[in-house]
Amino acid sequence: MAFVDDLESIGFVFQSEGRGGVRHYTLQGNRFLTYYCHVADDESGGVFSWEFALGEFCVTRGLQVGANDVLNIFLYSEADVAVPPNVASVVAQIDATETRLNSLRLADPGI
């Protein structure tokens, strides 16, 4: 349980158990950003992913996306990332996600 204990020590919370014993943990980055770590039943590693509630975020800024179905518009990474059973690899993915999201400068004339 070392991997799970380490995840919990940085704030991840158990959410549910899925097929094959995979355990799902979440961490709130902010009120719109949620990190996920899906841990193998034998703690041999996991899968890191995240979602950003883009629709809800835009509403708070006086913006809308598409038809403004705010509860169903999320931003995700193109692919989830397999992580070894150590918290440093999960923290590295959180840092990479934050760097990527912080780089979104929508008014940048260079895009």
Image (cartoon, rainbow, N blue to C red):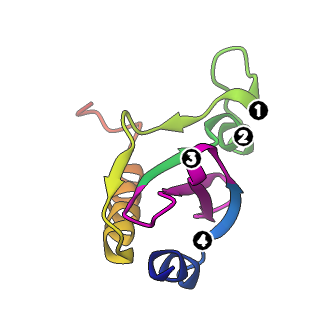
| Residue type, numbered disc 4 | Phe
Mark toward the viewer: 2 or 3: 3
Q: Quadrant of residue 56?
A: top right
Residue at image location 58% in from the left, 79% down from the top = 8
| Crowd band around label 1 with a 10 angstrom C-alpha radius: few (<14), some (14–19), many (20+) | few
Residue 43 sits inside the magenta stretch: yes
Residue 52 versus residue 41 in the image, above or below: above
SS for callout 1: helix
Q: Considering only order in the chain, which callout, 4 or 3, is on the residue closer to the N terminus?
A: 4
Mark number, residue 12:
4
Residue 19: horizontal and vertical position, in percent? 61, 43
First reached walking from the N terminus: tag 1 or tag 2: 2
Mark 4 closeness class: few <14, some 14–19, many ≥20 residues within 10 Å: some
Q: Which residue is mark 3?
A: 20
The CA span between labels 2 and 4 is 23 Å
Q: Residues within 10 Å of mark 2 (few under 14, many from 20)?
A: many
Identify the magenta region: 17-46
The reply to whether discs 1 and 2 touch (Cβ–Cβ < 8 Å) is: yes
Sequence-earlier tag: 2 or 3: 3
Is 64 magenta? The answer is no
N-terminal of the pair, mark 2 or mark 4, is 4
Q: Residue furthest top?
A: 67
Residue holding disc 2 = 56
Which three-letter amino acid code belongs to the residue tagged 2?
Answer: Glu
In front here: 72 or 104? 72
